[in-house]
Image (cartoon, rainbow, N blue to C red):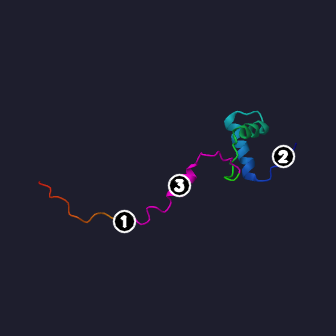
Amino acid sequence: MNILITRPEVEALLQQRLRATGCESTEEVIFRALLEFQPQESPQATPRTPGKRTSADACAKIRGLAEELDLTRDPSPGRDVAS
């Protein structure tokens, strides 16, 4: 397989990583990067286990519950402080 790199910033990054990591070739830099790469899964692709909830599910349930609360500071003067 041949890979053609056309973006100068990719070429520069490869050269930088080649020098910094002590890899023998750009192929080794790419190989190491691919070993570390973890693809992002879309929420639709994640299989759901019945009875298990995600943090997104929990947040969706409580979203908007505190909108009616008045969280302004109590204007009461409090107690006198003796100096």
Q: Which SS does the magenta portion mostly show?
A: loop
Left or right position of 9 against 66: right
Residue 83 rendering spot, x and y as whole percentages: 11, 54
Secondary structure found at label 2:
loop
Left or right position of 82 against 35: left
In the image, what residue type sits under mark 2? Ile
Instruction: Report the residue at 25% width, 66% height from top.
Output: 75
Mark 3 or 2, nearer chain start:
2
Q: Which residues are magenta?
A: 45-70
Residue 11 rendering spot, x and y as whole percentages: 75, 48
Question: Exactly how many numbered labels are in the figure?
Answer: 3
In the image, what residue type sits under mark 3? Cys
CA separation in Å, label 1 and label 2: 60 Å
Left or right position of 76 against 37: left
Given this view, does label 1 or label 2 mark the residue nearer the observer? 1
Instruction: Report the residue at 48% width, 63% height from top.
Output: 64
Disc 1 vs disc 2: Cβ atoms closer than 8 Å?
no
Tell me if mark 1 has few (under 14), some (14-19) or many (20+) residues whose alpha carbon lies within 10 angstroms of its own: few
In the image, what residue type sits under mark 1? Asp
* Residue at mark 1: 70
Instruction: Report the residue at 22% width, 64% height from top.
Output: 76
Secondary structure found at label 3:
helix
Secondary structure found at label 1:
loop
**In this view, 73 is above or below 17:** below
* Residue at mark 2: 3
Left or right position of 50 against 5: left
Residue 52 rendering spot, x and y as whole percentages: 59, 45
* Residue at mark 3: 59
